Image (cartoon, rainbow, N blue to C red):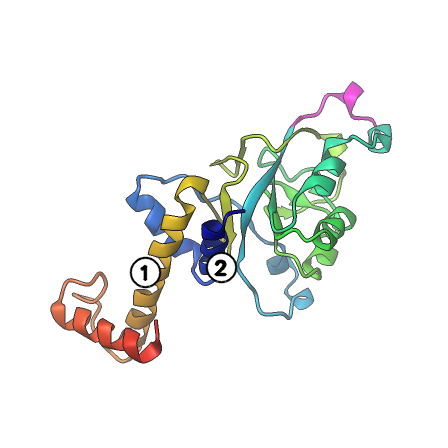
Amino acid sequence: MDKALVTAIQKLRAVSAATVATALFKRGLRQQVIQGVHPVQKDHPEQYARTPRNMVGPAFTLRYMPAREDRNQITEFLNPQHPQRQAIEQCPEGHVLVMDSRKDARAASAGDILITRLMVRGAEGVVSDGGFRDSMAIAALDLPAYHARPSSPTNLTLHEAIEINGPIGCGDAPIFPGDIILGDADCVIVIPADIAVDIADEATEMTAYEDFVAEKVREGISIIGLYPCTQDEHRHAFAEWRKAHNR
């Protein structure tokens, strides 16, 4: 990973998915949010006492397709080359495993043992537009995890893991290997790899101004002319605020 991208990832840890969505929208990109997913920890808040952190890292993908019964017997798990297992073992350190599970949580994309292995191997996080089994155990792991809802049956009952690290659609968002995945407490968004550095810079600037705005609104200032900024008095006040806060 080149130095500029490493720096961009560090910057993105301090911005929200909503701010990134605005920066992407300015560039005409409207379909980058992975729809219908949320942190597994929201299903089990009692398991998650730590301060949430942004999940940010390059995408490593796994694609599921509808299962065909003769190809998806329980004995398939004995195959050391099974794509689901291989995706867990191949996902590089610092990457986010993103699974196209056909927006179908009737069968689990993975369970706590596989996700624990992913964590131990140094993954940044995991996302499925389907569901995870053993979701309470996953919620207790020190690994950001996002899904549609808890699930129980094995993926073999309905889905077949078919392709590792190719282009996918997850929650209606187009994802290519290496795209930057950002997840916060609200949602997950996909940043095309070739503009990730620019988006990180712009989102960092936007976040500074939004923090300034939030402070002024709490002080009773009207949002008219402030958000968005159309008045010089607010521009000057923001410049002074940045100096005072080293932003």
The segment highlighted magenta reads 65-73
Contact between labelled residues 2 and 1, with CB atoms less than 8 Å apart: no
- What element does badge 1 sit on? helix
Residue at the front extreme, as displayed: 3
Q: Is residue 71 magenta?
A: yes
From the viewer's perspective, tell me whether residue 19 is left or right of residue 94: left
Q: Quadrant of residue 159?
A: top right
Q: Along the line of sight, which residue is nearer the eye, 23 or 74?
A: 23
Q: Quadrant of residue 62?
A: top right
Q: Position of residue 86 (x, y in %)?
A: 74, 36
Q: Amino acid at mark 1?
A: Met
Residue at the left extreme, as displayed: 232
From the viewer's perspective, tell me whether residue 49 is left or right of residue 156: left
Q: Amino acid at mark 2?
A: Gln
Q: Position of residue 180 (x, y in %)?
A: 49, 46
Res 178 seen here = yes
